[in-house]
Amino acid sequence: MRKAGWLGLAILTGVMVWRLLFGAGLHAVDSPDWTDNYDTYFRKYAKHYFGPDLDWRWFKAQAIVESGLRSKARSKSGAVGVMQIVPSTFREIQKDNPHFTDIASPRWNIAAGIYYDRQLYLRWQDIAYDADRLYFTFASYNTGHERVSSAADKVGKTPVRWKHVGPYTPKQTRYYVKRIRVLMEKPAAQHPSAELVVHDSDA
């Protein structure tokens, strides 16, 4: 009886810890708890840079993890806006997109973030399994492409799977990717494998 009680408590504690780490407080990306004020921009730039077959909500989920969709969000490292872009990165993006005029504007902040995702996505072509390329893109957005690439090198042969490379990345990066996936999986959503019909030339 006592053993059963302790076992039940251990299971309950485990579930609570899992929810704390990956699920608690994370409503589905479609939840009315998240503003839809920027959905037009997520739709527009997801289609522009990734084609019509990618579920645009992946980028909204990313923005929820980045900023909670707060346009005035600022990080200690100086990252700005909905997509938490560092000003130096925004200036680099502006070289190819001079019409991205204001990092603080939700429209241009989101456009720049998805454009940057696109550049990272292209770098994982033929290296990551197609079904996992979006996970590698998000991980690279979070911690830098070189760091994730170094982790992939430790796995060896390509193409690589995120489940094999993830353990070699920083804990915060694994958590970042997991949170995005949780947002999309509440309720069940399109798996990244469905977004493979994207164009590998810049839109």
Image: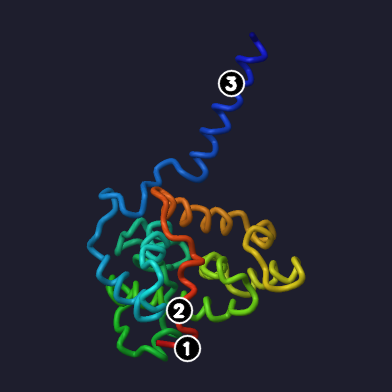
Residue named by callout 2: 198
Mark 2 and mark 1: Cα distance apart in space = 9 Å
Q: Which quadrant of the structure image shows residue 109? A: bottom left
Q: Residues within 10 Å of mark 1 (few under 14, many from 20)?
A: few
Q: Residue furthest left?
A: 37
Q: Which is more toward the observer, 50 or 9?
A: 50
Residue 40 on image: x %, y %? 25, 70
Amino acid type of the residue that numbered disc 1 sits on in the rendered structure: Ser
Nearer to us: label 2 or label 3: 2
Q: Secondary structure at mark 2?
A: loop
Q: Name the image colouring.
A: rainbow
Q: Earlier in the sequence, mark 2 or mark 3?
A: 3
Q: Secondary structure at mark 1?
A: loop
Amino acid type of the residue that numbered disc 2 sits on in the rendered structure: Val
Residue 115 on image: x %, y %? 42, 79
In this rendering, position of residue 102 left or right of residue 125: left
Residue found 45% across the figure and 61% down from its top: 76
Q: Secondary structure at mark 3?
A: helix
Q: Which is more toward the observer, 179 or 160?
A: 160
Instruction: Work out whether residue 16 can be spotted.
Output: yes
Residue named by callout 1: 201
Residue found 52% across the figure and 58% down from its top: 177
Residue named by callout 3: 8
Mark 2 and mark 3: Cα distance apart in space = 47 Å
* Residue 178 vertical position relative to residue 127 in the rendered view, above or below: above
